[in-house]
Every structure is written in structure tokens, then in C-alpha cells.
């Protein structure tokens, strides 16, 4: 079965991370499938809402670290950047259903969703610094905007996880529900949205985004340039090597 499941029903396209044995970490092929699905959802007038969900035990462990080592995204056309641009520019409503860990892009993609529902077991983290990397998906801009600078610094410089109630308090999450109910709740909300006039949804989202999309794309370009360079540098090599060898990284000489 595919690592990304795509399901379309009654105007709602649902993307499901389906790689539980690797904690729903995301490979280049999965990003390519997600980018293609988002492009399809954008182009197809019959699709009115997009839902992104995982499993009740894990949303996503972020980028597949082995895949990143073997096939680093070296150009702006890499599948991960294609997916990020497609979601940032997506005009219709997007809902995320998050239970369990949401690591790296598992958290940063939530900034680009319109509604986010979380299981009470959700754990959000952006451990880019711990991997010798910098933020991506415009999280260096959107985290300070949403959390305030100091809380964003805690999340991005220390890279520590924060949990469902904190995410609710800072506004990253709309509602916390039991993990077994999070996907069903997101689907119920998606059905409500799908019954509304699409043109009004699109115009309202456009106005709420307030013309920020261009700035987000620019920031993603800037972050992407640093991210691609940093992937080849000693800190990331040590962090990724340590992950593969199941040991703690040693940054003392870096
Ligand atoms: N990339 C590749 N493989 C990953 C992965 C990732 N990001 N996250 C988990 N896996 C793999 C593990 O290597 C392990 O594989 P194995 O069974 O072949 O040894 C399997 O998934 C289970 O992971 P494990 O760490 O044992 O699960 P856990 O429940 O104890 O912890 C996480 C879950 C998500 C908290 C933990 O796996 C984790 O922190 N992952 C790394 C997250 C990360 O740094 N992502 C990069 C962000 S840019």
C-alpha cells in the first residue's frame, strides 16, 4: 500500500500518512505524491476542502532522515519544496488532524492549515537546530507571529516539544479531542466546509491571509537556501549520523 493514501469523498480530499513502521516520516516520493495531490485539489473544482491526517498514535516524525542523507533536496524543484509551495498557495480550506508526535515539517505544515484539531496526546516539535539545520516552511516567520518571539525562540532554538494544551493556548490548534476522535472530528468539520459556497471560502481565506503569501514564498526561498547548504555541513552530518546509529550527537567540536 502507498505511504500516502489519497481519498476523495463528497468534495473532501483526505491525505493520510501511512508509514507507521517508520513513524510516518516523509520521503521524497511521499512529498512528490503530496505535492501532486495538492495540485490536483487546487485544480479540480469538485474538491472543496483538503484534510491532512495521520494515525491516532503519530502524525509524522518529519523528514525521513535516511532519505535526506541519501537524496538531499538539492534544488528548489525538489519534491519537498514543491509540496511546501503548493500548500502555501493552496486557495481552498485545509484542515489538519494531529495525534501523537508532529516533528519538524509535521508541525511546520500546520502553520499553513486553516483549522487544526489535536488529540490530547499530540506533541509538537521543530528540532531543526538539534539537527544542525534551520527552520523551514516559513516557520521562522510564522512561529514568532503566532507564538510571540520568546515562545517561538523556545520552540525553535531549544527545539523542545510542546503539547496539545500549550498549542491550544498559543492558537496553533483549534480544539483538543481524544486521539481516537481527531480524524473523525476533522472529517466532520470538513463536511461542514464542503457544504458552503466555494467562492466565498476562497475569497475569505484570501482576505484573511492578507497578501502574506508572497512574503511566505520569499521566506521559504531564503530558508531553503540555508537549509540545503546546512544539510551538507558537519553539524547536520553528525546529527543525522547519530540518529542512524541510535546514539546522542556530539556537537562539542562543531
Ligand atoms: N526518519 C527516518 N526514520 C525514522 C524517523 C525519521 N524522521 N523517525 C522515526 N524513524 C524510524 C526509526 O528509525 C525506527 O526505525 P527502526 O524500527 O527501523 O529502528 C522507527 O521509525 C520507530 O522509531 P522510534 O524512534 O523507535 O519510535 P518512538 O515511538 O520511540 O519515537 C519519535 C517516535 C517520532 C518521537 C522518534 O522516532 C523521533 O524523534 N524521530 C526523529 C524525528 C526527527 O528528528 N525528525 C526530523 C525532523 S526534520
Image (cartoon, grey):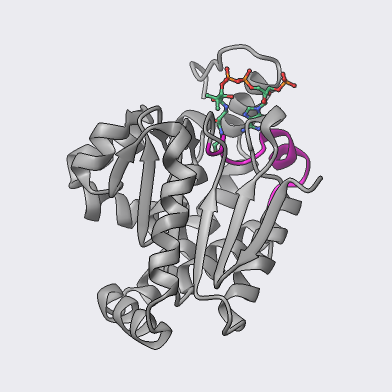
Check if residue 50 falls in the magenta segment: no
Residue span colored magenta: 59-73
Instruction: Look at the image and say whether residue 72 sits in the magenta stretch.
Output: yes
The quadrant of the image that shows the N terminus is top right
Q: Splitting the image into four quadrants, where does ligand 1 fall? A: top right
Residue lying furthest top in this view?
Answer: 247
Q: Write the residue at 68% across / 58% down.
A: 6
Residue 51 placement (x, y as % from top left): 51, 58
- Pick the front one: 207 or 93: 93
Q: Quadrant of residue 193?
A: bottom left
Residue 218 visible in the displayed image:
no
Residue sitting at x 73%, y 34%:
66
Is 55 placed above or below 44 here?
A: above
Seen at 47% across and 55% down, the residue is: 187
Location of residue 247 with respect to 178 vertically, above or below: above
- Is residue 36 at least partly visible in the picture? yes
Amino acid at each position: 500500500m502507498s505511504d500516502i493514501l489519497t481519498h476523495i469523498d463528497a468534495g473532501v480530499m483526505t491525505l493520510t500518512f501511512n508509514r507507521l513502521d517508520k513513524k510516518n516520516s516523509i520521503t521524497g516520493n511521499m512529498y512528490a505524491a503530496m505535492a501532486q495531490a495538492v495540485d490536483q485539489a487546487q485544480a479540480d473544482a469538485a474538491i472543496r476542502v483538503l484534510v491532512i491526517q495521520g494515525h491516532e498514535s503519530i502524525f509524522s516524525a518529519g523528514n525521513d532522515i535516511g532519505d535526506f542523507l541519501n537524496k538531499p533536496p538539492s534544488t528548489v524543484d525538489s519534491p519537498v519544496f514543491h509540496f511546501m509551495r503548493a500548500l502555501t498557495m493552496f486557495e481552498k480550506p485545509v484542515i489538519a488532524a494531529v495525534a501523537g508526535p508532529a516533528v519538524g515539517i509535521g508541525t511546520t505544515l500546520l502553520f499553513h492549515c486553516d483549522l487544526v484539531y489535536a488529540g490530547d496526546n499530540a506533541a509538537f516539535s521543530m528540532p531543526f537546530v538539534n539537527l544542525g539545520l534551520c527552520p523551514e516552511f516559513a516557520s521562522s516567520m510564522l512561529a514568532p507571529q503566532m507564538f510571540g518571539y520568546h515562545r517561538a525562540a523556545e520552540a525553535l532554538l531549544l527545539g523542545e516539544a510542546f503539547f496539545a494544551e500549550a498549542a491550544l493556548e498559543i492558537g496553533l490548534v483549534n480544539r483538543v479531542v481524544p486521539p481516537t476522535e481527531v480524524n473523525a472530528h476533522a472529517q466532520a468539520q470538513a463536511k461542514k466546509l464542503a457544504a458552503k459556497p466555494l467562492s466565498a471560502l476562497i475569497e475569505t481565506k484570501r482576505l484573511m491571509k492578507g497578501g502574506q503569501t508572497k512574503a511566505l514564498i520569499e521566506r521559504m526561498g531564503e530558508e531553503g537556501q540555508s537549509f540545503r547548504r546546512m544539510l551538507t555541513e558537519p553539524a547536520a552530518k553528525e546529527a543525522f549520523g547519530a540518529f542512524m546509529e541510535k546514539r546522542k550527537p556530539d556537537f562539542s567540536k562543531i
